[in-house]
Amino acid sequence: MQINNDEIDFSRIHRMFRELPLFDDVYLNMQAMNIAMIDTFITEQEYALLREYIEIEKTPTQQALFVSAQSQMWIFALYELLRTWSQRARKLKIWKESGALNEMLKRVNNDEHNLGALMRARHIEWVIDDDGAIGYLERCESAIRPIFDVTSAIRINLAKHEVKGKPNVVVRAPGYGRINGLCGALDYELDLGDGAFQFLNRRDIAEMLRKIDTPRKTI
């Protein structure tokens, strides 16, 4: 049985993020680049785990623990990036609807030596100048929403030991994963509450990212 990662387009995740608005912000882009780079590293570790699992015919405990730790940290980092981007998009929409864009632009322009503030100013100016900016952001948010919802749900299971929207439900096995026989990623139980669950692994989420069809800006 040959196990490899030759068919994975590892450049796609970073390229997908760069196709979204607001990712011209150098610091958001750095986070996106981190997600893409670590995906490559963890995928190699997952396949190595599977090869060793098949070779020794039992779970390589230390390697499995390492892959699990890396996988969970990757999921948490991805969630934070998606949350940050979505929050910025929503703020621009709210400021547009409330007529606060010019006031917010003045505020960020006051911090002239702050590169992060400069990036924010550019985005505000874009929304002021482009009547189609908010509609474009909304289409992009819709494209990202499925992956954001999935990542948010598993992150709450793993980090908070809760079910999304049901904080009083006790998650059955938060953080416990079994080695997937096809790719070596750890299959976690995504607890949905009411006794329902599904299996989800980090590779599933990475493939969802690679398959996102980012909306094109209409003129």
Image: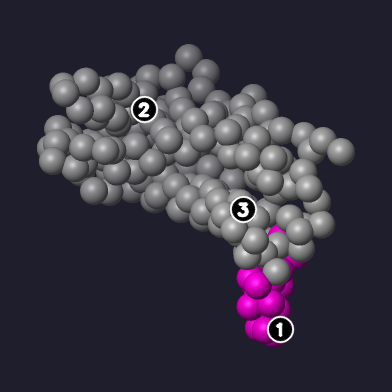
Choose top left, top right, bottom left or bottom right for residue 99.
bottom right
* Disc 1 element: loop
Q: Earlier in the sequence, mark 2 or mark 1?
A: 1
Residue at label 2? 200
> Could you say which is closer to the camera, residue 139 or residue 184?
139
Front of the two marks 1 and 3 = 3
Residue at label 3? 97
Q: Is residue 94 above or below residue 109?
A: above
Please say if the residues under marks 1 and 3 sit with CB atoms less than 8 Å apart.
no
User: Residue 205 colored magenta?
Assistant: no
Which amino acid type is marked by label 1? Glu
Which amino acid type is marked by label 2? Leu
Q: What is the CA distance from the residue labelled 2 to the residue labelled 3?
A: 38 Å
User: Residue 113 colored magenta?
Assistant: yes
Q: Tell me the quarter of the image containing the C terminus.
A: top right
Q: Is residue 219 visible?
A: yes
Principal SS element in the magenta part? helix
Residue at label 1? 112
Front of the two marks 2 and 3 = 3
Position in image of residue 215 (x %, y %): 71, 33
